[in-house]
Image (cartoon, grey):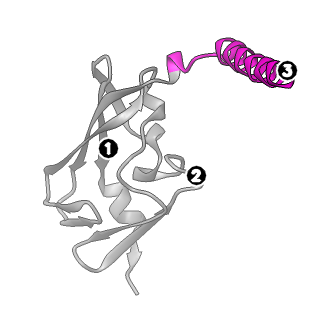
Amino acid sequence: MERKITWMRYLLIGINSVVFMMMTPSCGDDEDCWVISNFIFSNSTNHIINTSAGVINPNSELSIRQEGLGPCSVKAGNYVPPFLGETKIIFDNHKCLIYQSTKVGIGEGPVGINNYVSKRIGKLHYEFRYEFTDLDYEKAEDCD
C-alpha cells in the first residue's frame, strides 16, 4: 500500500511538471538567429583619424563587419556599435575627442547607434554609416 502511495506521488509530480512546461510560453520570438552588421566609418576631413577600431585616412573609409547570434526579431536600433564605454577619437596624433556611452549603444557620436545612418541589406543584415567631419575636428581638444 505504501509503495502505491509513493508511486502516485511521483506520478502527480511528473504530471504537474509536464503541465507546467506546456503552459510556459515558448521562446518563439526570442530564438537566436545569425545576424550581420557592417559598420562603415567615413572620414570626410583632411586629417588622419585613429580609433580603437583602426586608422581612417583622410577622405577614406574603415569597414568593420560583425556577425553572431542575436534575436530573430532584431531591428536596426537593437544593434551595438563597435565602440563601447569611453571612446577616444584622435586626429593627427594630437587632437582628441572623447565620447562616453551612457548605456550600451546609447550616447553621442560613434558610441550611439542612433547616430548612424542605417540601411537594411537583408532580413537580419544591416549596414550602418557614420561620418567624421571637420566639425568633429573643430570640437577636438589637444590630447594630454
Q: How far apart are marks 2 and 3 (CA)?
A: 56 Å
Label 1 environment density (alpha carbons within 10 Å; few <14, some 14–19, many ≥20): some
Mark 3, residue position: 5
Q: Do the residues labelled 2 and 1 touch (CB within 8 Å)?
A: no
Query: In the image, what residue type sits under mark 1?
Result: Tyr
Considering every residue shown, the one lying at the far front of the view is 1
**20 versus 60 height, above or below:** above
Q: Nearer the viewer, residue 133 or 22?
A: 22
Q: Over which residues does the magenta segment extend?
A: 1-29
Does dot 3 land on a helix, a strand or a loop? Answer: helix
- Residue 131 falls left or right of residue 57: right
**6 versus 132 height, above or below:** above
Q: In which quarter of the image is residue 102?
A: bottom right
Residue 89 % position (x, y)? 34, 66
Mark sitting on residue 130: 1
- What residue is drawn where x is 55% and y is 21%? 27
Mark 2, residue position: 103
Q: Which of 98 and 121 is in front in this view?
A: 121
Query: In the image, what residue type sits under mark 3?
Result: Ile
- Residue 1 falls left or right of residue 59: right
